[in-house]
Image: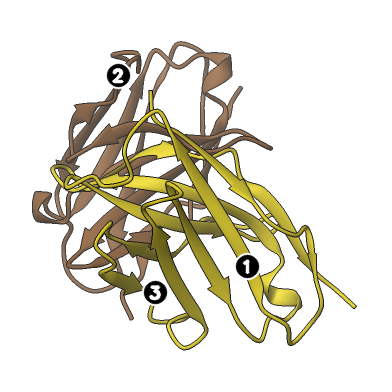
Amino acid sequence: QTVVTQEPSSSVSPGGTVTLTCGLSSGSVSSRYYPSWYQQTPGQAPRTLIYSTNSRSSGVPDRFSGSIIGNKAALTITGAQADDESHYYCVLYMGSDVVFGGGTKLTVL
Amino acid sequence: QLQLQESGPRLVKPSETLSLTCTVSGASIIDYTHYWVWIRQPPGEGLEWIGSIYYSGGTYYSPSLKSRVTLSVDTTKRRFSMKLSSVTATDTAVYFCATQYSGTWALDHWGQGTRVSVSS
């Protein structure tokens, strides 16, 4: 079974830049998997940030960007703010299946 | 603006069937561009895709849940539903309904989620 891998945790200083990644247990992530990224704060539904690798969802600040780096999808936050402290999930569309990564808990400190 | 609202029992006994409904407002459920999706999140854990259904009834299920899940859609009542059979405590979770846009495969709208506990 396909496993989508994410760093369990990461940290960034306010104003800094951080890149979260999304890989596959076997193989490389490419745009054909339509990688998307979601932000979730405790007790809330996820919020769509990025879809189709690098398209920002409506209303998402441009400090959030998506890309492919090497064999992984990546979410980069430039100029991190305190309220970016959240869990971030990547999702890959694999044929008819939707596969979530385990999520990354981002700390802003 | 499309909105989704989950509804159903908050407590289900082990071995019984968990049934949830998601009501769609602000858009038609007969939508050629979207799939209707169920996702869950156990306490303190990550998100898990359960399955997706198209307005015409075509379904796709998570391999790990396929044997216990049934999705359906009621276009007359603008809602879609999920049944999960033979539940155990490990099925305790917040259950979300969502939409997936077939142009980008993004999960572009989410319900607020409903917490379901499995306990006797």
> Which dot marks residue A47?
none
The quadrant in which the N terminus of chain B is found is: top left
Q: Chain of mark 1?
A: B
Give the residue at mark 3: B62
Q: Which residue is mark 2?
A: A58
Task: Give the quarter of the image for residue B40.
Answer: bottom right
Q: Colour of chain B?
A: yellow
Picture quadrant of residue A109: top right
User: Is A75 left or right of A41, judged from the image as shown?
Assistant: left
Chain under disc 3:
B
**Residue A7 coordinates in the image, percent (x, y):** 45, 51
Secondary structure beneath label 2: loop
Please name the amino acid that badge 3 sits on.
Ser
Residue highlighted by disc 1: B19
Pointer 2: residues within 10 angstroms few (<14), some, or many (20+)? few
Question: Observer-nearest residue: B20 or A107?
Answer: B20
Q: Colour of chain A?
A: brown
Of badges 1 and 3, the one in the foreground is 1
Question: Which residue is at a point 29% across and 25% down the rendered structure image?
Answer: A57
The local secondary structure at tag 3 comes to: loop
Tell which of A18 and A65 is nearer to you. A65
Residue A37's place in the image compared with A61, above or below, is below
Residue B93, percent from left and from top: 67, 60
At which x and y percent is residue A85? 57, 27
